[in-house]
Amino acid sequence: MLRIALVNLKPGTAKTTSAVWLAYAFHRRGYSVALADADPGASAMEWSDQAGGFPFKLAGLPVKDFHRRADDLAADVVIADVPQVEDHAPIARSAMRWANVLLLPVAPTPIELDRMAPMADLLEDLEDVRRPDAQTCVLLTRVVSGAASGPAARRSLTRQGYDVLSTAIPRLEVFAQSFGAEPEQNTAYDQLATELLERTGK
């Protein structure tokens, strides 16, 4: 089972957008998929309501024992939309224990890059209780094509010791305005699914 948790310290980092688009990308490849909405704000649940439902399992799990309950969502790929750590640390920490791929969405802006130092401290704090096969990857999001900020952010994060995925999500209206709609095919999220499968050998 591929267990993917999308986590960051603050809200507004495209966690829910990335979780839903990635779930669709895996579903369209024929994998059984479950999306766990661990955020008390229930954005993924609301998205599903507006879209007339998702074609894969969806469950609300904003619980502090997420790591014990999420595997009840038996599927090839389980994706967790995790709430921001600053407001919901017990839920977020539980999801981070559960994941074998921890995906950190980060926009290439100074304030988001600055927030990655405390995230490193949290990862170190959880090291002894995370899964032995766990990977932590940074996903650059809202990247402006041709701008210097994307490559600069990649270099900065790499210097901080983060593993930055080759796939980057561009800043496009198709992503920004997609809430409540069915995601399109053949986008950067399909490339992301491919990269994650290659990295995990699934």
Image (cartoon, rainbow, N blue to C red):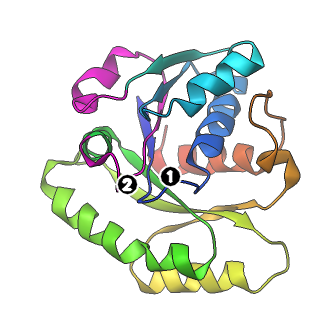
Secondary structure, mark 1, is helix
Up/down of 47 relative to 128, above or below: above
Q: Nearer the viewer, mark 1 or mark 2?
A: 2
Gap between marks 1 and 2 measured at Cα: 9 Å
* Disc number placed over residue 199 in the picture, else none: 1
Residue at 22 percent of width and 29 percent of height: 65
145 vs 131, nearest the viewer: 145
Residue type beneath disc 2: Gln
Apparent side of residue 196 relative to residue 47 in the rendered image (left or right): left
**What residue span does the magenta drawing correspond to?**
62-90
Residue at 28 percent of width and 30 percent of height: 66
Up/down of 65 relative to 92, above or below: above
Apparent side of residue 186 relative to residue 127 in the rendered image (left or right): right
- How packed mark 1 is, by other alpha carbons closer than 10 Å (few <14, some 14-19, many 20 or more), is few
In the rendered image, residue 127, in percent from the top left (x then y), is placed at 19, 58
Secondary structure, mark 2, is strand
In the rendered image, residue 20, in percent from the top left (x then y), is placed at 64, 34
Instruction: Identify the residue position indicated by label 2 in the image.
Output: 135
Q: Residue 85 in magenta?
A: yes
Up/down of 156 relative to 187, above or below: below
In the rendered image, residue 12, in percent from the top left (x then y), is placed at 58, 55
Labelled pair 1, 2 in contact (Cβ < 8 Å): yes
